[in-house]
Image (cartoon, rainbow, N blue to C red):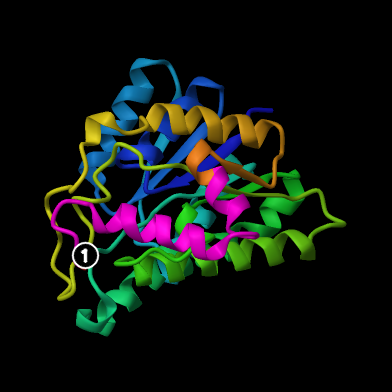
Amino acid sequence: MEKVAIVTGASSGIGKALSILLAQKGYKVALAARDIAALEETKAVIDLKGGISEVFKCDVTEEKYCSFLIDSVIKLWGRIDLLINNAGISMRSVFADTDSSVIEQLMQVNFMGTVYCTRHAIEHLIESGGSVVGISSIAGYRGLPGRTGYSASKFAMHGFLQSLRLENRKNNLHVMIACPGYTESNIRNKALLADGSTQNESPLKEDKLMSAAEVAQQVLQGIEKRKKEVIMTTEGKLVVFLAKFFPNFIDNMIYRKVSREPDSPF
């Protein structure tokens, strides 16, 4: 029987690359995001490659949309084998200057979106012995300056998924946290500033970053091997490991790196 995957944030970046790759591997893929036009572009690529996918408008900050997404996929294909919680936004501002609504929005998209989709898919994933994946960041292991809301949302995602894994030790449910490095995408262009407006221009040279296709390959390998976590860069692995023994050194390194970004907020 063909496997079924749901990818949130499938309209661009990592989500789009994952959707295309999964379809190439024989999955039927539910493409979920708010931007229908962009989702149709993802579907068009999949169609050209002979894959199977369907488009679903879904705002993960609202549970009713997440519930409708899961119910629709079950009605259409009868099963769910993989849920990739990829929808996410970032921010770039000093906390003292940041409106509380910005933090709330980060938590709603990055954390509660994962909770809502997973809550409504969990029984189907347990039944299929499937996988729940959270696309996260090193910011979920170590707080990043200028990214308080982003780090908080990713720490919350990690705690949620780790707890979910332990709860289901006796079930054949695979739970994985995937942490790319800086990846070529539009997440920095759409990052929120202190007043909630979007940054519009990335401070990084996007063409020099890890490609979304490379991230997708590593995520899929992790799923196939049923890994608990996938940290995709040497720098990321060092940060996570060394922070256990040399936290002050790692904090200083992170501060220097982020403060040197163009137009750093601090």
**Corner quadrant of residue 77:** top right
> Looking at the image, which residue is at 60% across and 57% down?
121
Tally of marks: 1
- Where's residue 31, x and y in %? 40, 42
> Looking at the image, which residue is at 53% across and 56% down?
71
Left-right relation of 157 to 61: right
Placement of 139 over or under 232, stated as above or below: below
Pick the quarter of the image with the C terminus: bottom left
Left-right relation of 51 to 25: left
- Where's residue 154, x and y in %? 48, 63
**Magenta stretch bounds:** 237-265
- Where's residue 180, x and y in %? 46, 42
Name the main secondary structure of what is drawn in magenta. helix
Whether 221 is among the magenta residues is: no
Q: Badge 1: few (under 14), some or many (20 or more) residues near its Cα, within 10 Å? A: many
**Corner quadrant of residue 265:** bottom left
